[in-house]
Image (cartoon, rainbow, N blue to C red):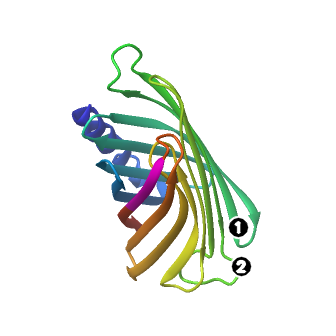
Amino acid sequence: MKKIFVITCLGLFAFTSNAQSTSFSLEGQNALSLHNGSFSGIAFMGHSFKNTRVGLFGFGLVSKNFNEMFVGPTYLFSLDENSILEIGTGIGIENYKQQPIRCMTYVYIESNPLKMNKHKLQCLFDTEYLGSGPWYLAYATYNVTNHFGIGIHAQQNVVQGMRFQVYPISWLMVYGVAGWNFEANDMGFMACAKISFSN
């Protein structure tokens, strides 16, 4: 699975020469509860092509007991001069032997009415289905300044609660989530670091 994801990432990079913009991010998530903990690594890559709203994305997640990767098309809508909406859907595989095929669909909204360096409002809803079963990730964050933001975050089997994020430097975001894990009926916490690059 990990080798397949690396090969897919290299294939996506091959499109860079024809891309209007390219973004890449790596994220480490350390999820904790009163009874256990887990660590996950997440990679996301997106390309938008010249003179079109169509793009391509790749997504991968690696953890101790679960691995998955997806590729698929995206489409970008301009809501106004400062706001965009992106929809992506992909197909992939996971390490679930009974049904390894898995699908993913996401909707992302970004709004920057005050034209700050960091996007003022960001919302994401990501759902996965087939394979080992449904899964979701959703958040809505508001950057109070260029270096600090707050919001809500819901991630299945991890935590649903308040999210606080800081930007020590332009390409690094550190955030934490504290709340309740409704699936496990337990307190949930998450500490994360995310690096992002784009051109």
Label 1: which secondary element:
strand
Mark number for residue 24?
none
* Residue 199 appears in the figure: no
Q: Magenta stretch containing residue 140, yes or no?
A: no
Say if the magenta span includes residue 188. Answer: yes
Mark pair 1, 2: CA separation: 8 Å
Q: Which residue of the protein is positioned furthest toward the right in this rendering? A: 80
Q: Is residue 5 above or below residue 101?
A: below
Does the rendering let one see residue 151?
A: yes
Give the residue at the far top of this rendering.
98
- What secondary structure characterizes most of the magenta part? strand
Looking at this view, is 155 or 100 the one in front?
155
Q: In the figure, is residue 36 to the left or right of 142?
A: left
Dot 1 and dot 2 residues touching (CB under 8 Å): yes
- Where's residue 178, x and y in %? 47, 63
Q: What residue lies at 55% left-to-right and 60% top-to-bottom?
A: 161
Secondary structure beneath dot 2 equals loop
Residue with the most extreme left position: 3
Q: Quadrant of the N terminus?
A: top left
Indicate which disc, 1 or 2, sits on the residue closer to the N terminus. 1
Please state which amino acid type lies under the numbered disc 2: Pro
Q: How far from the left and from the top, in percent, is residue 183?
A: 51, 40
Circle 1: residue type: Ser
Classify residue 167 as left or right of residue 110.
left
The magenta segment: 186-190
Local crowd size for mark 2, using a 10 Å CA cut-off: few (<14), some (14–19), many (≥20)? few
Q: Quadrant of residue 17?
A: bottom left
From what the image shows, is residue 69 above or below residue 153?
A: above
Where is residue 47? Give x, y as percent: 48, 52
Q: Which residue is identified by label 1?
A: 83
- Mark 1 crowd level (few <14, some 14–19, many ≥20, 10 Å Cα): some
Give the residue pinned by disc 2.
113
